[in-house]
Every structure is written in structure tokens, then in C-alpha cells.
Image (spheres, rainbow, N blue to C red):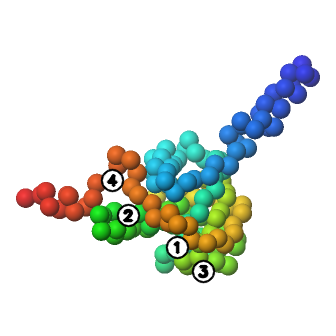
Amino acid sequence: IIICGIVVYKIVFKSPSNPVNTTYEIPSNNYTNILKSVHDDLNTYIGQKISFTGYVYRVYDLTENQFVLARDMVVTSDFQTVVVGFLCTSDKAKDFKDGTWVNISGKITKGYYHGDIPIIEIDNIKTVDKPEDSNVYPPDDFYLPTSSLVYNNP
């Protein structure tokens, strides 16, 4: 029984393949697919550790310990963009000005902001340079430009 307990402990708490102990890096080329997946199936991702880069973006009704870790998503062929990202919380949030590029790592939690949403509880945050691939693109097979809705209606 003791040996079984030790084996189970090593598998569950020490195994490098254990997803709870793994931090996943979100790359720019898959950013919006991951963002969409987490929003669509939040309960599956709660507790998952992630790391990614974006810029600090705030709207008027966020608290001083909140910001959106944002990217600009290209939505038209002439490179018009909209802001997309994860809402993040950190005691250090107020130390970073809007527009500052940072890399964060943290845990996905379930929170509320005009409905249930994923919120990243930041464990580590550091200032970084703006990446060359700073823009992101719509999720695969998901985005329908508003202009096609407007122009196709009678």
C-alpha cells in the first residue's frame, strides 16, 4: 500500500506530463484560437497555467489591479484592428502603464465581467519589447466581418 501511495504521488504531483504542473506558452499565430477556446469552454481550462505576451489595456470600469493583456486583431484587408485579450489581475497591475508590452504567466480562473469570463491570476509579470508579430488574426473558421453582414442585407 505504501509503494502504491508513493507511485501515485509521483505520477500526480511530480510528473512533468501532468498538465496541472505545466505552463503553456500561447504563441501569436494561435492566440485567437486559444482565446476563443478558453472563452467557449471555460470550465475545462480553469486552473491551467499559461504564459503569453501582450500590451496593457484598460477600460474605464476595471479596478486598479486589473487590465486586459491585449493584442490587436486584424479584421479587414486594409489592416483595421480590434483589441482582443484576456482580463488579468495582479497586485502589481498599477505599476504598468497602458500600452506597455509585458509577458505574464498565471493561472486561468473563472470570474465575472459583464458575464462569466476567464481571468488570468498573474504569478509573474515583466516588461518586454514589442514583438515583431504583434498583430494577431481571427480564429480559424470563426470570424465573419461585419461589413459582409451589412452589404449582404437588402
Q: Residues within 10 Å of mark 3 (few under 14, many from 20)?
A: few
Q: Residues within 10 Å of mark 1 (few under 14, many from 20)?
A: many
Asked which secondary structure carries label 3, the reply is loop
Going from the N terminus, do you reach mark 3 or mark 2 first?
Answer: 2
- Up-down: is 38 above or below 28? above
Measuring 54% from the left and 77% from the top, which residue is drawn there? 99
Please give the label number shown on residue 57. 1
Give the residue at mark 2: 74
Locate residue 15: give its quadrant. top right
- The residues bearing labels 1 and 3 have C-alpha atoms spaced at a distance of 8 Å
Q: Position of residue 68 (x, y in %)?
A: 54, 67
Q: Furthest-right residue in view?
A: 2
Please give the label number shown on residue 97. 3
Give the residue at mark 4: 143
- The residues bearing labels 1 and 4 have C-alpha atoms spaced at a distance of 22 Å
Q: Furthest-left residue in view?
A: 154
Q: Amino acid at mark 3?
A: Lys
- The residues bearing labels 3 and 2 have C-alpha atoms spaced at a distance of 23 Å
